[in-house]
Image: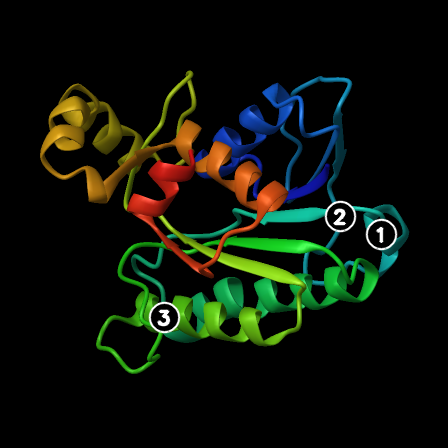
């Protein structure tokens, strides 16, 4: 399987990239993002386009891939809905449309989150925008598309978030992860499990399009 990964330098993307490079089922990984990962591996290729919202100059390099793992995202904290929509909805749909045109048989996997609002009418801004993004991705016409909705994600294997506040948050909670896993396993997962679940779903498919935390842990 050949995979395109967006957001490989973020916490989730780092975990997904690690699992792709370790998997014997993944033969090539192409990362596309605002910055390079700094990693070296025979299976890894990287593109840092001038504008992620305009992939036309690199379309030729995006052909022939079986799956896209879209892990690119930002926190909604302090953002206006218009700005959050531009990054979360507009960019995601632009990328997805381009990839569908180039690779009509591609599987598209989008990282959303627990609590995403499929009705698009709830009070939570981020949940509405994520819900609209999910809904419209599923309407595009991909042969297979899946919406991953992880809850609390524990970074493993030396993976760290680039957001300083979140880094402190994860460091404080890390010792309690085994307790969370025992008490509320339906709400917690790890970077390993998210990555492995994506690979499994891309390879073998899944009956449901929306995969909650419990599903991710089962598959990962």
Residue visible at 38% across and 42% down? Answer: 216
Q: Label for residue 58?
A: 1
Residue at mark 2 to residue at mark 3: CA–CA distance: 26 Å
Q: Is residue 87 left or right of residue 84?
A: right
Residue visible at 32% across and 64% down? Answer: 116
Could you tell me if the residues under marks 1 and 2 are in contact, i.e. CB atoms within 8 Å? Answer: yes
Residue 178: percent from left, percent from top: 17, 23
Q: Neighbour class for label 2 at 10 Å: few (<14), some, many (≥20)?
A: some
Q: Label for residue 80?
A: 3
Residue at mark 1 to residue at mark 3: CA–CA distance: 31 Å
Q: Is residue 6 visible?
A: no
Q: Is residue 18 placed above or below 187 in the rendered structure?
A: above
The residue tagged 2 is 49
Residue at mark 1 to residue at mark 2: CA–CA distance: 8 Å
Q: Secondary structure at mark 1?
A: helix
Q: Neighbour class for label 3 at 10 Å: few (<14), some, many (≥20)?
A: few
Residue 26: percent from left, percent from top: 68, 30
Query: Upstream in the sequence, badge 1 or badge 2?
Result: 2
Looking at the rendering, which quadrant does residue 21 occupy?
top right
Instruction: From the viewer's side, name the closer residue of 45 and 19.
Output: 19
Residue 4: percent from left, percent from top: 69, 43
Q: Secondary structure at mark 3?
A: loop
Instruction: From the viewer's side, name the closer residue of 83 and 71.
Output: 71
Residue visible at 16% across and 19% down? Answer: 175
Q: Is residue 154 visible?
A: yes
Query: Upstream in the sequence, badge 2 or badge 3?
Result: 2
Residue 89: percent from left, percent from top: 51, 68
Residue visible at 85% across and 52% down? Answer: 58
């Amino acid at each position: 399987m050949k995979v395109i990964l967006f957001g490989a330098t973020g916490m989730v993307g780092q975990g997904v990239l690690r699992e792709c490079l370790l998997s014997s089922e993944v033969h090539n990984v192409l990362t596309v993002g605002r910055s390079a990962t700094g990693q070296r591996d025979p299976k890894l290729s990287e593109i840092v386009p001038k504008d992620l919202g305009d992939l036309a100059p690199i379309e030729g390099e995006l052909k022939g891939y079986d799956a896209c793992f879209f892990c690119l995202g930002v926190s909604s904290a302090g953002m206006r809905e218009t700005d959050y929509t531009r990054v979360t909805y507009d960019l995601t749909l632009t990328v997805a449309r381009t990839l569908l045109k180039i690779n009509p048989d591609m599987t598209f996997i989008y990282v959303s989150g627990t609590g995403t609002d499929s009705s698009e009418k709830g009070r939570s801004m981020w949940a509405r925008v994520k819900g609209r993004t999910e809904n419209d991705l599923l309407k595009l016409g991909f042969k297979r598309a899946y919406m991953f909705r992880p809850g609390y994600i524990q970074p493993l294997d030396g993976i760290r978030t680039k957001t300083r506040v979140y880094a402190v948050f994860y460091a404080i909670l890390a010792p309690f992860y085994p307790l969370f896993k025992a008490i509320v396993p339906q709400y917690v997962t790890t970077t390993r499990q998210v990555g492995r679940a994506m690979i499994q779903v891309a390879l073998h498919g899944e009956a449901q399009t929306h995969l909650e935390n419990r599903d991710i842990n089962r598959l990962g």
